[in-house]
Image (tube, rainbow, N blue to C red):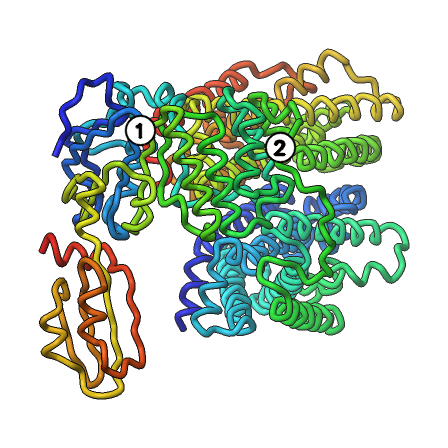
């Protein structure tokens, strides 16, 4: 799984990284490399170990064994130097009570010491974030925007983002992808965790998938596209055309109950639409399968 | 039943702390009576006479003494006069947690989403608190009875006192519950309620010596004081207890209704429209970028409130110095006179030192506890992880917290010492300027020691930090109070952080004690740094 690169080309490198919380919880023997300038997606279902990995990279928690290096520096031993190069958006947003957004930004900027006011303003404008409001009055989405401002405002060489689009509306999700692309263009490395495949498709070069605390695969994005599939539910007014559906290329896990057919469709919708042409369809829904469903398909 | 069990679990720490504090306070005061009052009838009569004189001087704080030649009279005056306030503050903290704390943590939203009505949620909290109050008061009274050692103290009289204290506690809970609906955060609710209760306590105190009019009826402490069951054969004032229970019921009901009608996260008061200009820029306040100053800037209102209260209290204490010292030094009881001399209470300037510094050390340790509460919250609410995502070391976090605490305390102590010096000069009490400055400077050692111990516990177990540090404060206070009375050896007395501070204005500076406080602070700080570096943050 590991990509052979010289250490100076690597933004993130973990070796046998393990954090064992007991009862199978945590992250185990993680070997991972992220190149400088790369946008790396870290995918996994809830509880897979994504946040634990990110906290290890940030030096917030200590590894049970193994090591993590950021730009060649040990993320634990050299954590102060590491964080000088890193921007971080946590998965769980902190509580700042009655502080105004502008005060929080200034306070954290004071701790960092390398923040341009114009960078803050630019980010706040792009995300349409009013920094004059009190934190406790922010909606969840606005709190998330503030966390993104704090992560990007010092234009770090590496940005580590833990499920960063949680709570953002689609418009601001797009703006967020734009911010990520701009950061990559100036040479930054992005490490972004998510549990939604389609989200990382927008911006990532490579994707690592973690499940039950272990790295299942690391693939280029185009390889993952092959994994794309849709969960399809079709309700018929009359009998389900079972034989025609069984013949559809790419339709798997087909289940028939009364007037309903359910299955997992790979590839395009065209063969399926041809198969149901001429029948009375009263309902058709398709959705992206969860990562767990993909795992059940690929890594059973 | 689930609601009841959850509420009970959340009150466990308060239950343990109040049982320990109540029992210790009750038992030690009961045991102290025999030591102080003597064994013979003439000794007790003389003791009662002198205490009555002293009681008149302490009327701003304690109820008028009655039958001080009996254990019941002594406890009613010395113990229960203050216990009403202690239980009131406990009720305020608990009600603030029920009325705001659970909401801040998102628990109320979960309960409501689970189909629990707001009224049912809050009523279950009230019921659990009432049940716990019964247990705490029962434990305290039971052990006082066991400690009476042959003194005539009827169980029925104590039971009546328990009912009176219970009614007062519930009334304070009701006040706090209602206030919690009017402010937005738990901290504001607890702070506002504590301020209101102290104001009502002082209103009652003022009413003992002057006519404050019907406003005194607003004070639950006045209503509490209307019953004197330990000196009145167990009789309760029906009006006092009735009004307390009625007020508790009405205030709680109004609080529940307000809670049911208001928005979650909002207040029951009409909301002011925030007319600020939309801004995309960071704050231009340069103080927010400076180490140590930035955290101080964020709590400037809090520090200013403490500073003003300290200055006012200092002036007040100096104003009553002459009359109290005159009362103390005229004691006809040899043991009592010796006790006051041992405590250094026999000269005006010495008394200023004692009363000011003992109050200051106690209050500054409470200030340190509030800061430790804030540090614990930093951890639980994710702010610590956010700070540590910036390029700062964990060592800096510990050092900066303590530095911020010491700068705030230095401001408060400096203002207070100036107020003491000026007020004493106006009372024709000459004070050595150098001694005042030295004593004020040495005050820093108390919050340093408390803050460092609290920091260590907050790093290790954030949830219990406040309770553990409060226990240290209560233990230190009790040892300081009772060590000279019972003639405990020095090593026991020196277990109190307050004893280590000594009496730098009235006697020789106890440098070994000061070194002890500094040593405790340094060692606890080093251990805190080591502990924070080893532990996981945000896990």
Q: Which residue is mark 1?
A: B534
Query: Crowding near pointer 2: few (<14 within 10 Å), some, many (20+)?
Result: many
Q: In the figure, is residue A4 to the left or right of B25?
A: left
Viewer-nearest residue: A260 or B267 = A260
The image quadrant that residue B309 belongs to is top right
Q: In the figure, is residue A274 to the left or right of A129?
A: left
- The picture places residue B193, in percent across and down from the top left corner, at 67, 53
Question: Residue at the location (27% across, 50% down)?
Answer: A197
Q: Earlier in the sequence, mark 1 or mark 2?
A: 2
Q: Residue furthest bottom?
A: A238
For the image, the number of numbered tags is: 2
- The picture places residue B382, in percent across and down from the top left corner, at 44, 41
Q: Which residue is mark 2?
A: B281
Q: Secondary structure at mark 2?
A: loop
Query: Crowding near pointer 1: few (<14 within 10 Å), some, many (20+)?
Result: few
Given the image, what chain letter belongs to the residue carrying mark 1?
A: B
Q: In the figure, is residue A30 to the left or right of B56?
A: left
């Amino acid at each position: 799984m590991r990509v052979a690169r010289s250490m100076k080309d690597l933004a993130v490198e973990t070796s046998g990284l393990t954090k064992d919380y007991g009862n199978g919880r945590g992250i185990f023997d993680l070997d991972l490399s992220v190149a400088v300038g790369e946008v790396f997606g870290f995918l996994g279902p809830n509880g897979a170990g994504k946040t634990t990995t990110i906290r290890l990279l940030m030096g917030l928690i200590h590894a049970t064994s193994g090591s993590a290096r950021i730009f060649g520096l040990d993320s634990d031993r050299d954590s102060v130097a590491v964080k000088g190069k890193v921007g971080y958006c946590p998965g769980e947003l902190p509580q700042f009570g009655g502080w105004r957004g502008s005060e929080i930004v200034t306070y954290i900027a004071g701790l960092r010491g390398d923040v341009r006011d114009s960078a803050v303003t630019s980010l706040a404008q792009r995300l349409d974030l009013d920094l004059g409001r009190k934190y406790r009055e922010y909606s969840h989405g606005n709190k998330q925007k503030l966390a993104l401002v704090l992560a990007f405002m010092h234009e770090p060489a590496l940005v580590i983002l833990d499920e960063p689009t949680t709570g953002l509306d689609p418009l601001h999700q797009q703006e967020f992808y734009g911010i990520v692309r701009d950061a990559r263009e100036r040479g930054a490395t992005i490490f972004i965790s998510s549990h939604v495949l389609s989200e990382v498709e927008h911006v990532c070069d490579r994707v690592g998938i973690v499940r039950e605390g272990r790295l299942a695969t690391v693939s280029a994005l185009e390889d993952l596209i092959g994994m794309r599939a849709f969960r399809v539910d079709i309700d018929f007014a009359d009998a389900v055309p079972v034989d025609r559906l069984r013949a559809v290329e790419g339709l798997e896990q087909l289940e028939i109950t009364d007037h309903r057919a359910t299955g997992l469709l790979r590839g395009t919708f065209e063969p399926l639409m041809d198969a149901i042409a001429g029948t009375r369809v009263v309902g058709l829904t398709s959705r992206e399968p969860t990562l767990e469903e993909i795992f059940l398909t690929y890594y059973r | 039943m689930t609601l009841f069990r959850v509420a009970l679990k959340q009150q466990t720490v308060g239950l343990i702390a109040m049982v320990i504090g109540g029992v210790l306070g009750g038992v030690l005061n009961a045991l102290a009576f025999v030591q102080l009052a003597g064994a013979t009838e003439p000794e007790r009569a003389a003791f009662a006479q002198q205490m009555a004189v002293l009681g008149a001087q302490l009327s701003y704080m304690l109820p008028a003494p009655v039958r001080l030649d009996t254990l019941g009279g002594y406890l009613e005056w010395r113990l229960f006069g203050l216990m009403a306030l202690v239980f009131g503050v406990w009720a305020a903290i608990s009600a603030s947690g029920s009325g705001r704390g659970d909401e801040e943590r998102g628990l109320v939203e979960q309960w409501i989403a689970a189909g629990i009505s707001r009224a049912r949620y809050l009523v279950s909290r009230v019921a659990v608190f009432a049940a716990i109050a019964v247990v705490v008061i029962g434990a305290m009274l039971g052990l006082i009875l066991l400690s009476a050692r042959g003194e005539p103290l009827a169980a029925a009289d104590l039971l009546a006192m328990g009912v009176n204290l219970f009614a007062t506690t519930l009334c304070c809970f009701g006040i706090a519950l209602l206030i919690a609906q009017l402010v937005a955060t738990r901290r504001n609710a607890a702070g506002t309620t504590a301020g209101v209760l102290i104001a009502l306590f002082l209103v009652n105190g003022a009413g003992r010596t002057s006519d404050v009019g019907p406003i005194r009826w607003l004070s639950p402490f006045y209503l509490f004081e209307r019953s004197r069951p330990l000196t009145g054969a167990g009789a309760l004032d029906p009006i006092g207890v009735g009004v307390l229970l009625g007020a508790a019921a009405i205030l709680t009901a109004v609080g529940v209704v307000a809670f049911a009608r208001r928005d979650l996260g909002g207040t029951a008061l009409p909301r002011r429209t925030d007319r600020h200009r939309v801004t995309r820029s960071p704050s231009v306040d340069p103080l927010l970028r400076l180490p140590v100053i930035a955290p101080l800037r964020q709590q400037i209102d809090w520090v200013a409130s403490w500073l003003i209260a300290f200055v006012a209290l200092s002036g007040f204490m100096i104003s009553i110095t002459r009359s109290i010292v005159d009362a103390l030094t005229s004691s006809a009881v040899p043991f009592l006179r010796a006790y006051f001399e041992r405590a250094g209470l026999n000269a005006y300037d010495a008394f200023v030192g004692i009363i000011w510094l003992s109050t200051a050390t106690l209050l500054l340790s409470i200030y340190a506890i509030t800061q430790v509460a804030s540090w614990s919250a930093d951890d639980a609410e994710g702010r610590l992880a956010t700070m540590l995502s910036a390029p700062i070391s964990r060592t800096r976090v510990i050092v900066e917290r303590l530095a911020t605490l010491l700068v705030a305390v230095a401001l408060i102590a400096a203002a207070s010492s100036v107020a003491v010096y000026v007020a004493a000069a106006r009372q024709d009490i000459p004070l050595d300027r150098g001694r005042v400055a030295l004593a004020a400077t040495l005050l820093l050692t108390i919050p340093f020691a408390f803050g460092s111990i609290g920091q260590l516990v907050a790093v290790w177990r954030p949830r219990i930090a406040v309770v553990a540090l409060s226990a240290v404060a209560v233990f230190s206070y009790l040892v300081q109070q009772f060590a000279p009375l019972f003639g405990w050896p020095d090593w026991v007395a020196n277990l109190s952080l307050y004893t280590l501070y000594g009496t730098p204005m009235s006697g020789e500076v106890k440098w070994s004690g000061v070194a002890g406080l500094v040593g405790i602070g340094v060692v606890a700080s080093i251990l805190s740094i080591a502990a924070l570096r080893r532990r996981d943050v945000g896990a």
